[in-house]
Image: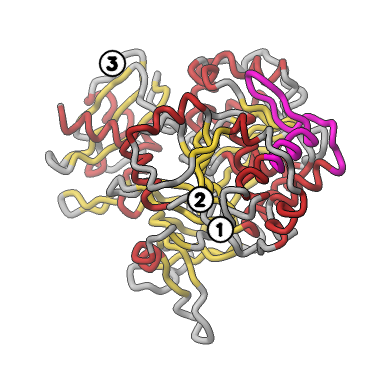
């Protein structure tokens, strides 16, 4: 397989009439997905023989997946784009990616009127799928692609808020999909309920894992995630066999009590990534679903998933959960501040090399150069390692333990503090649904945000955490909220909380 599009070709050949994807409005079989994508690719190819990416600017839908596959059939990477993105962000993405085309619908296309497209053609998906297929041109475009070429350019924001185009190669997605199929025992009977937006890297395993095994992908209605008590019913009604969701969603479900008394016999595997998964709520899931596969996946957008831990033992509610060991064809180094690998038990920055690592930031060689390092022990040749900015250490099982962000480690009154440790302790407070810790630089204090229905006085919280945290790590301020803010990926919105601090 030289390209991710080979997964669709294979699925359409083996399981043509099985459902590939279903959303709130329609379903497509693998045959229909292939036919629509190849016709749309033929329309793209008539706009010119370009290898520049295709910006897919559509709502989360079956049409968006047609757009992804059409770009790949045309031999081009795709840029998945949030249909609700503000105009300023769209402009920055367009200016950096210089796409060969924008694939959208009429409603969103009209909204592009105030944006400088730089002459880029805007193509409507409903017209593209009506194009006559040029099989020879499509096959020739696919044949030119190698597994080292980019499959997508996914824009993420760094500390500056400027979108950065993370460029992932075909081989990374192909190997990841194969690993998921083997690890979770997926086959053509698999039904995956997707949670993550399709412009967020957590969706990659859902989309291409389903395609790899000929399974069915359900694009779960986004409104359901506002009502966590309804989600288990949705899984039950649709006989879902596998989910891969962000921890905040799983925490909300566990806290809602929705897993009590409900039977989910079809659900075989539960994976999660994107945030720290607390064992307090994971244990609720494990008690409700004994004998199932639970997996903690780790990796920034620049590596997709690079390590994984399939839960194989019990943990106390307050224990941290490992992020595991590298996936096949991936390697991890933990480097200390001196740039050398740390010793067992010591904390170092997680650096990743391998098939799934970011080729580079699209049209930003300056950022790319700063983001990578090499293995200092290898003098024969310089193997590129992506510097994640995350910290980790090895436990007695040889598993990597996540120790928070490098920029989440602060120094307060001479003491080095990892904010993630404060969060772990706060999660055990009675009546707390979720937590987030922010360091207020202006006031030089640790602020603990709690999602709780009742006010928890600072003195009470500090007394409860005294057995877990030393005095110098205690929060100086507590903010109780009925609901912590979430971003578009359903993770806790730390940017909003930081702004709230600035204004209060």
Give the residue drawn at x 56%, y 57%: 50
Kindly indicate the quadrant of the structure image that contains residue 476: top left
Task: Identify the mark at residue 51; answer none if there is no mark.
Answer: 1
Q: Earlier in the sequence, mark 2 or mark 1?
A: 1
What separation in Å lies between label 2 and label 1 (alpha carbons)? 8 Å
- Circles 2 and 3, Cβ within 8 Å, touching? The answer is no
Residue beneath disc 2: 100
Give the residue drawn at x 24%, y 35%: 498
Residue 353 location, x and y as percent? 53, 65
Q: Is residue 36 magenta?
A: yes
- Circles 2 and 1, Cβ within 8 Å, touching? The answer is yes
User: In the displayed structure, would residue 280 be above or below residue 264?
Assistant: below
Query: Which range of residues does the magenta coloring cover?
Result: 13-39
Q: Nearer the viewer, mark 1 or mark 3?
A: 1
Residue 398 seen: no
Residue beneath disc 3: 455
Q: Give the SS element for disc 3.
A: loop
Residue 419 seen: yes
Give the residue drawn at x 34%, y 46%: 92
- Circles 1 and 3, Cβ within 8 Å, touching? The answer is no
Residue 197 location, x and y as percent? 52, 33
Q: Nearer the viewer, mark 2 or mark 3?
A: 2
Kindly indicate the quadrant of the structure image that contains residue 367: bottom left
Residue 275 location, x and y as percent? 46, 40
């Amino acid at each position: 397989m030289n390209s991710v599009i080979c997964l669709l070709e294979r699925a359409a050949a083996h399981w043509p009439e099985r459902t590939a994807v279903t959303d709130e409005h329609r379903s497509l079989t693998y045959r229909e997905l292939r036919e629509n994508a190849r016709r749309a690719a033929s329309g793209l190819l008539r706009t010119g023989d370009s290898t520049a990416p295709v910006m897919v600017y559509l709502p989360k839908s079956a049409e968006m997946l047609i757009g992804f596959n059409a770009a790949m059939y045309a031999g081009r990477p795709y840029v998945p784009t949030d249909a609700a993105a503000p105009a300023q962000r769209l402009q920055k993405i367009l200016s950096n990616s210089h796409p060969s085309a924008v694939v959208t619908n009429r409603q969103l296309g009209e909204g592009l009127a105030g944006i400088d497209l730089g002459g880029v053609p805007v193509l409507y998906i409903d017209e593209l799928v009506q194009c006559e297929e040029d099989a020879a041109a499509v096959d020739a475009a696919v044949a030119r692609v190698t597994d080292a070429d980019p499959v997508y350019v996914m824009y993420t924001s760094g500390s500056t808020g400027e979108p950065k185009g993370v460029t992932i190669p075909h081989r990374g997605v192909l190997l990841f999909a194969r690993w998921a199929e083997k690890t979770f025992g997926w086959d053509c009977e698999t039904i995956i309920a997707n949670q993550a937006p399709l412009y967020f890297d957590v969706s990659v395993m859902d989309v291409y894992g389903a395609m790899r095994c000929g399974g069915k992908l359900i694009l779960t209605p986004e409104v359901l995630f506002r009502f966590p008590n309804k989600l288990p019913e949705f899984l039950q009604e649709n006989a879902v066999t596998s989910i891969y969701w962000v921890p905040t969603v799983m925490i909300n479900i566990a806290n809602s009590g929705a897993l009590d008394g409900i039977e989910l016999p079809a659900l075989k595997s539960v994976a999660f990534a994107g945030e720290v998964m607390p064992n307090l709520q994971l244990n609720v899931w494990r008690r409700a679903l004994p004998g199932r596969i639970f997996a903690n996946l780790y990796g920034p957008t620049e590596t997709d998933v690079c390590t994984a831990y399939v839960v194989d033992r019990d943990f106390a509610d307050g224990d941290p959960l490992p992020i595991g060991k590298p996936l096949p064809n991936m390697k991890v180094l933990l480097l200390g501040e001196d740039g050398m690998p740390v010793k067992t038990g010591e904390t170092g920055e997680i650096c990743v090399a391998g098939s799934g690592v970011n080729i580079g930031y699209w049209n930003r060689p300056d950022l790319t150069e700063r983001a990578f390092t090499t293995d200092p022990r290898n003098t024969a040749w310089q193997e590129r390692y992506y510097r994640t900015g995350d910290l980790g250490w090895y436990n007695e099982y040889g598993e990597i333990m996540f120790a928070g962000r490098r920029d989440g480690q602060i120094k307060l009154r001479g003491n080095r503090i990892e904010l993630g440790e404060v969060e772990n302790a706060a999660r055990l407070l009675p009546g707390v649904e979720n937590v987030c810790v922010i360091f207020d630089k202006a006031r030089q204090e640790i602020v603990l945000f709690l999602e709780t229905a009742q006010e928890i006085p600072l003195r009470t919280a500090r007394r409860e955490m005294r057995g877990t945290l030393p005095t110098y790590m205690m929060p100086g301020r507590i903010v109780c909220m009925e609901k912590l803010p979430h971003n578009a990926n359903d993770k806790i919105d730390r940017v909003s909380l930081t702004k709230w601090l600035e204004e209060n």
